[in-house]
Amino acid sequence: MPSPFPGMDPYLEGYLWPDVHHRLATEISRRLAPRLRPRYVARLEIVMVQDSTPEADVGILYPDVEVIRVTSASGSFPPVAPSHQSGSGNERARGSAVVVAEPEIAPFLVVPMPFEVRLVSVEIRDVAHNKLVTCIEMLSPVNKREPGLTIYRGKRQRLFEGGVHVLEIDLLRRGTRPVSHPAIPATPYLVALTRSQAGRTEVWPVGLRERLPVVAVPLRAPDADVPLELGAVLVAVYEEAAYDLSINYQQPPPPPPIPAEDAEWVAEILSPSSSQG
């Protein structure tokens, strides 16, 4: 069953995202491969990174993890029952025996351990020299908050300096967008292309009600750009993975909340009458 959303489905931005992320990169590589032959190839680049601030995604990306702030640990160690007999210090007489009260554990903080996150990008390399020509980045939550945001921006800068085209696909509403400019509309999703040696970035802002665009994948001159149909990629991934069987559309989507200007529209397309029609 297809997604009820014409473009990006915000319900995919929660615990399903790691699977969505990997499948999108795989499908992009699969679709580009025949268009790149025989001068180029598309390869998946998989790296493992540490998400050192997972509490930002507790209950969203990591639904089974909790961050607990403990103000008192006394509940963990039952206090000794009070005695009516007098005693000194921590000692109380109970019959002929002396009971020593357990010391109370000081307050402490419980936080999750860093998570190991798999990040997948699509690399387009020339066949002659196996040189990286274009990098297609699928942004993940770890790329959109510190310290991962600074690390990702550093990687992007190194790619630019190395003469590599960078196509960034941001299908996550939460987090800080690596690409920013006053002229870019405040849309929930964004695709940005920075060509090698170009002093500008081509941007495709995408609203919640819009289909994902067909974007350009640049190669080496004089080879022409290859069109990439992101909408078709997402449709194929959604249907192949049967995400509709894992999503309860009667519940709110993962944070952040849907803006007021789109909330009524979302409620309408998710209504039972709409799905039946």
Image: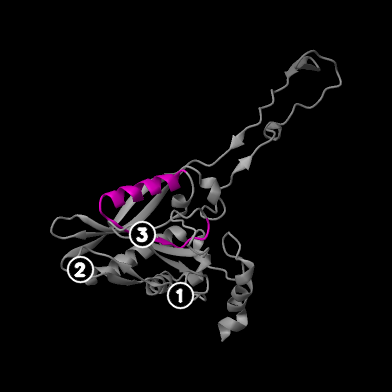
**Type of the residue with mark 1:** Arg
Please tell me whether residue 102 is drawn above or below residue 166 in the rendered image.
Answer: above
* Badge 1 vs badge 3, beta-carbon distance below 8 Å: no
Residue depicted at 66% across the width and 27% down the height: 106
| Circles 3 and 2 in contact, beta carbons < 8 Å | no
Towards the viewer: 180 or 266: 180
Of residues 172 and 97, the one nearer the viewer is 172
- Residue that mark 2 sits on: 223
Point out the stretch of residues depicted in magenta.
147-174
Which is more N-terminal, label 2 or label 1? Answer: 1
Q: Nearer the viewer, residue 31 or 110?
A: 31
x 42%, y 57%: residue: 139
Q: Amino acid at mark 2?
A: Asp
Disc with the residue nearer the chain's start (1 vs 3)? 3
How far apart in space, not on screen, are marks 3 and 2 (Cα)? 20 Å
Residue beneath label 1, please? 211
Report which residue position mark 3 lands on: 200
- Where residue 252 sits, quadrant-wise, is bottom right
Give the label, 1 or 3, closer to the camera: 3
Does dot 3 land on a helix, a strand or a loop?
loop
